[in-house]
């Protein structure tokens, strides 16, 4: 059924009946979300922004009619990535500790897709205005080459390690133009002749439910989004099939496509409410039941991300991985 805005319902993970916890749509206004985040002591939490820079963002590849055929990272206009960062990330940042910083990541570029971390650290934003500066600097860098596939594994595992290090709640905002396509066959460690199928992003998202992390995935561009909508609804079933534990509903997908041509304040606030609906509820649940689940690790194990540095004038070097 449509929600309070008259739009189709958001695609959230809604589980019940077998031990994992889920959350209803409680809030209908942006002020309600703001009050709830403050009541949940969100100022003592952190945020991570992750940006998709795969080739499908390019106009010649994606043919994005919802953005008038432009590259979704077109910096000559206010592009959909920037709009989502402001609408969603800006709301979260407004309730965080004003002295805090938060990492800005990219994934899907040629420098990181074959690196163990699977992502690039653009920098730690000191205040939300710096997110856009880091984003524009990275996308303007001629050394950056869009690539693929689309995988969230690296940024989700980065968030897990940050949660382990800080023991603080994290909101991970992932903005993407495409569906996950990182499934692969790998040798079965139990057999010299067999292979097994892995789903790195799915497995990382299931693991994230053991930690104080809310993952908000926003789809920009034309889609299609059927697999992303199924991702939300299938995480628990996937966990059962993989003999993994999905502790609590910590992931949701919301498409921005229908909002890309509107400037209507009420409609855009409704989108923001949909994105943030679960954040204060999950934070309050974790405060009551414990930040770390029984399957949580106590030490980080992920690889350090590729570190991006703005190019010096006339520099030709490419971004390099840490030693």
Image (spheres, rainbow, N blue to C red):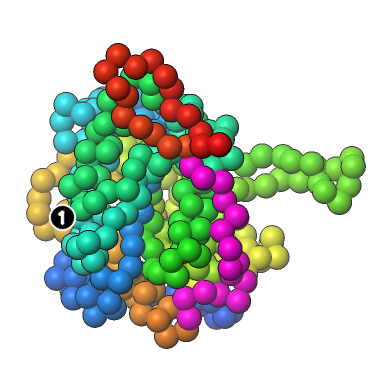
72 vs 266, left or right, is right
Q: Which residues are magenta?
A: 290-305
Residue sticking out furthest to the bottom: 288
Q: State the residue at coordinates (56%, 58%).
A: 300
Q: Position of residue 46 (x, y in %)?
A: 33, 62
Task: Identify which residue, 30 or 43, lies in the foreground.
Answer: 43
Q: State the residue at coordinates (24%, 33%).
A: 136
The residue carrying mark 1 is 267
- The image quadrant where one finds the C terminus is top right
Q: Quadrant of residue 60?
A: top left
Task: Identify which residue, 272 or 306, lies in the foreground.
Answer: 306
291 vs 25, left or right, is right
Whether residue 59 is visible, yes or no, is: no
Q: State the residue at coordinates (22%, 75%).
A: 38
- The image quadrant where one finds the N terminus is bottom left
Q: Position of residue 78 (x, y in %)?
A: 16, 36
In the rendered view, tell whether residue 177 sits above or below residue 271.
above
Q: Position of residue 172 (x, y in %)?
A: 38, 56
Q: Position of residue 159 (x, y in %)?
A: 46, 56
């Amino acid at each position: 059924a449509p929600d309070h805005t008259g739009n189709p319902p958001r695609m959230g993970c809604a589980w019940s009946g077998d031990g994992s916890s889920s959350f209803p749509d409680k809030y209908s206004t942006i002020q309600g979300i703001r009050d709830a985040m403050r009541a949940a002591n969100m100022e003592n939490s952190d945020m991570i922004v992750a940006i998709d820079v795969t080739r499908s963002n390019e106009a010649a590849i994606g043919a994005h009619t919802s953005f008038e055929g432009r590259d979704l990272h077109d910096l000559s206009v206010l592009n959909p990535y920037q709009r989502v960062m402001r609408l969603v990330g800006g709301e979260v940042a407004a309730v965080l500790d004003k002295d805090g910083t938060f990492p800005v990541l990219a994934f899907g570029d040629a420098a990181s897709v074959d690196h163990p971390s699977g992502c690039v650290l653009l920098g730690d934003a000191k205040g939300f205005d710096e997110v856009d500066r880091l984003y524009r600097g990275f996308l303007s860098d001629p050394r950056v080459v869009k690539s693929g596939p689309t995988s969230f594994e690296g940024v989700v595992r980065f968030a897990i390690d940050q949660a382990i290090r800080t023991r603080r709640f994290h909101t991970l905002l992932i903005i993407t133009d495409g569906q996950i396509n990182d499934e692969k066959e790998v040798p079965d460690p139990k057999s010299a002749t067999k292979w097994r199928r892995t789903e790195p992003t799915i497995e990382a998202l299931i693991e994230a439910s053991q930690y104080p992390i809310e993952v908000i995935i926003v789809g920009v561009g034309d889609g299609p989004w059927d697999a992303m909508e199924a991702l939300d609804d299938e995480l628990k079933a996937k966990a059962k099939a993989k003999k993994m534990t999905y502790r609590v509903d910590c992931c949701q997908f919301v498409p921005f496509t229908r909002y890309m041509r509107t400037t209507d304040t009420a409609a855009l606030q409704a989108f923001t409410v949909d994105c943030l609906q679960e954040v204060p509820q999950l934070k309050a649940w974790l405060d009551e039941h414990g930040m770390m689940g029984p399957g949580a690790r106590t030490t980080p194990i992920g690889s350090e991300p590729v570190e991006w540095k703005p190019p010096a004038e006339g520099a030709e070097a490419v971004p390099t991985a840490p030693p």
